Amino acid sequence: MLSGSSGALRKAAQAAARRLSSAASSAACGSAAPSVGRLNHVAIAVPSLEEAAAKYRDVLGVQVSEPQALPEHGVRVVFVQLPNTKLELLEPLGEGSPIAKFLEKNAAGGIHHICLEVEDIAASMAHVGARVRLLDRQARTGAHGLPVVFAHPKDMCGVLTELEEVPRR
């Protein structure tokens, strides 16, 4: 399923990165464009974390992390390590989880969001938030223990886009 979507996903990620780093938009709204880095991960909603983790590990032979509960986000996650990025498999943690709502519409699961790295979450929120809707007014701590914020998919070419502050390498 993922291979058929990879071209569209790559185009969506490139379009989102171009939109976030538009110098023309910076001049119009007065804040510096965020320094967008690499694609950190692609998140996939799944009905069963154990089954999905086993499938990626056993079928593709990739390394899969231990499950991690993130009650503040309403999910349990594992990360699938790839040479150039990660896949984040998401399972709902409770009925009020946004992933539960996603799975109501997409029972088999599917691509939920992309995550782009930024150097400064506060500056990125100021710049991006002046142009599109952010889902939170404050950054929250994400699965990697780093600040994250989400941009509304209706404002980002139909893609829920997570920005994650990652220290310079």
Image: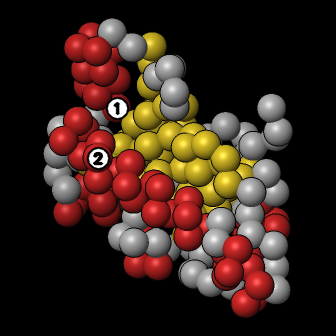
Q: Residue at horizontal 42%, vertical 44%? A: 43
Could you tell me if residue 97 is visible in this image?
no
Residue at image mark 1 = 49
Residue 28 coordinates in the image, percent (x, y): 73, 90
Q: Amino acid at mark 1?
A: Leu
Q: Residue at horizontal 23%, vertical 36%? A: 3
In the picture, residue 31 is in which quadrant? bottom right
Q: Quadrant of the C terminus?
A: top right
Which of these two is toward me, 31 or 123?
A: 31
Q: Quadrant of the N terminus?
A: top left
Residue 20 coordinates in the image, percent (x, y): 61, 67
Q: Residue at horizontal 55%, vertical 64%? A: 18
Q: Secondary structure at mark 2?
A: helix
- Identity of the residue furthest to the front in this view: 24
**Labelled disc at residue 7:** 2
- Tell me how far mark 1 sits from mark 2, CA to CA: 25 Å
Judge whether 74 appears above or below 155 on screen: above
Q: Give the mark nearest the N terminus, 1 or 2.
A: 2
Of badges 1 and 2, nearer the viewer stands 2
In the visual, does 168 lie left or right of 133? right
Residue 87 coordinates in the image, percent (x, y): 44, 34
Judge whether 49 appears above or below 73 on screen: above
Q: Secondary structure at mark 1?
A: helix
Q: Amino acid at mark 2?
A: Gly
In the visual, does 100 lie left or right of 165? left
Judge whether 11 appears above or below 66 on screen: below
Q: Residues within 10 Å of mark 2 (few under 14, many from 20)?
A: few
